[in-house]
Image (tube, rainbow, N blue to C red):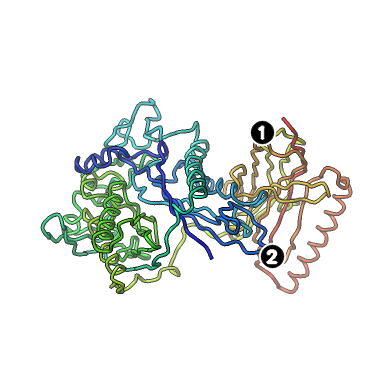
Amino acid sequence: GGRLYLHQGSLREANINRSPTSYLLNPPEERDGYEEEGDTDKVFLQLLLEQQQQQGDGGSTVTTDNDSTLVGLINWFAVHPTSMNSTNQLISGDNKGYASYLMEQKYNPPGTLVGQDDHKFVAAFASTNLGDVSPNTAGPRCLDSGLPCDPVTSTCHGLNELCVAFGPGRDMFESTQIIGRKQFDKAVELVDEVVAHKTKHRVPAGRVASRHSFIDMRQLNVTLPASNGTVVQTCPAAIGYGFAAGTIDGHGAFNFKQGSNSSNPFWNMVGGFLSNPSKKQMACQSPKPILLNTGFIRMPYAWDPNTVPISIFQISHLFILNVPGEFTTMAGRRLRNAMLKILREEGGYDNAKVTIAGISNTYTHYITTFEEYQGQRYEAASTLYGPYTLDAYLQEFGRILRDLLSDRPSEMVPPPKDSVHKQISLLPPVEVDAIAVGKKFGSVVENTKDSYDNGGSETAKVLFRSANPRTNPRTQDTFLTVEHLDDKGKWHVYMTDADWDTKYIWKGGVTYLGMSFAEIHWNIAQGTPQGIYRLCHAGTRRTLLGHVGEFLYQAPDFGQLSYGVNLLVATARALYRQFQWARNLLHRKHIHHLRDFEGCSSSFLVYEA
């Protein structure tokens, strides 16, 4: 069995509004109600799971009772995971992933590897209404002058490429750590308060239920309660000019500008090749100038969904609104407030807590308020279904919430067609992994040094001959390991590619004549235990001819056989592989095969700085 706990706090100096001029278009009296929080939400909501500990379980994480342990949590906080800017070419969990990494490192047993099955504590740092929220708290500046960008268009001298948001760190890696650690620190603070006052924060026993509905957003009739029942309609999906301008977190191209309310004949012609919007569609989406009429583009399949899913989860007095897009700060506030009003007035939930889980089930870009839509910055240009998109979601979430409270099923339109098997890729497939004559996959090109100090300023690097990582993305596995030698002469995995201090950089493609190289980095953190380490790389290669065997190539090592003996062993292995290749070729077997390979650097010493 288990228990749930719900707690919240305020987290400041971890986000800014990246479209403040749009936020100011909302009614002053509405904005005045959020004077303390301002133009971004600061609420940090946390749901914790406690599990009754079984006898002989061995214990592990955060003990909250003599017989129970916290085993997981979900945090909701409004900030984009865009601390790593568009120059980053490595896969990264960004600030939310870093917060999760720190949390799981703290509350799992020492030595637990990131993302492995033996995790006893799992932490999720989730998205909520983050549509107009940036983690780059130093704000946007012009790259050429250092001056602030134009606030309406986010340009410098008319160019969006020159306007970029920075901070709070010296570079994107440090910024990711700072914003991630702020979320981690707040999460730890809330956990500590729950542990100290469990009864106060315990989720009471109550109903667990949900409602789900598909809605057709193309021409949905929407009744506006504030306008004496005026009925308006949503529009088929379309993308505006401001979308192509990008944001201060990632600029666009071709001199598009945020805040564009007019079109360009050339780009109209380009977009018209795919789908030419009708006068009705243009009027419906106004003042958005349509760049891509995505709701009508069907080749090779629908570019944007017109049928979208919405759902609500109820856990006692907690209600989770699962939205299919990125709500802006004020749009999210209106949705939460509307649902709270229904819960209190019609459901009797005076202590209800409502959060938004975005992005869920499908992606419909952004959702702004009607007022923000008029400004046509990036978020408004990306609001697919026209100026009444938010009003449609308010109406439909209200409908399924009342269904949930009344214990009746929710009506829905048929779900969209499954297009999984129609997906295309413009990337050419990996046909074969090439390597220089006489060289081996997994062999070392550039080795590590013999020793490094643990003062926090050194990085161990090694370059391997490798294969294209698209051949095998190694899901739930790793491309690299940092391994430590114990007192008994056995190697143990110390880190993987999921650790913040490691990097796997692939170099290959046409410029390398089809050959691949893997550059492995380990930033040796301050206080790393002294000892003998090595860096290893694993991959999968694609061959056209034959079953050529699985092998481990290891560079000459401390305390191991002489290089000459290693060379003899490697030669024997090579002869055996050639024999296998010839035999398979004669029998026409395994003409196209995938084979794993692995290699390790020389071992090296990490010593006290």
Question: Seen in the image, is 460 located left or right of residue 583?
Answer: left
User: Disc 1 or disc 2, which is closer to the eye?
Assistant: 1
Which residue occupies the foreground of this view, 504 or 609? 609
For the C terminus, the image quarter is top right
Dot 2: what SS?
loop
Question: Seen in the image, is 231 located left or right of residue 369?
Answer: left
Q: Amino acid at mark 1?
A: Glu
- Residue 545 marker: 2
- Is residue 506 among what the camera can see? no
Question: Seen in the image, is 439 located left or right of residue 513?
Answer: right
455 lies above or below 202: above
- Residue 458 marker: 1
Residue 392: quarter of image? bottom left
Q: Amino acid at mark 2?
A: Leu
Query: From mark 1 to mark 2, how far is it between C-alphas?
Result: 42 Å
- The number of numbered badges drawn on the structure is 2
- Residue 247 marker: none
- Is residue 599 among what the camera can see? yes
x, y percentage for residue 607?
75, 34
Name the residue rendered at 89%, 49% in the picture: 565
CB under 8 Å between callouts 1 and 2?
no
Residue 318: quarter of image? bottom left
Name the residue rendered at 81%, 44% in the picture: 557
Q: Sequence-wise, which precedes: disc 1 or disc 2?
A: 1
For the N terminus, the image quarter is bottom right
x, y percentage for residue 341?
25, 57
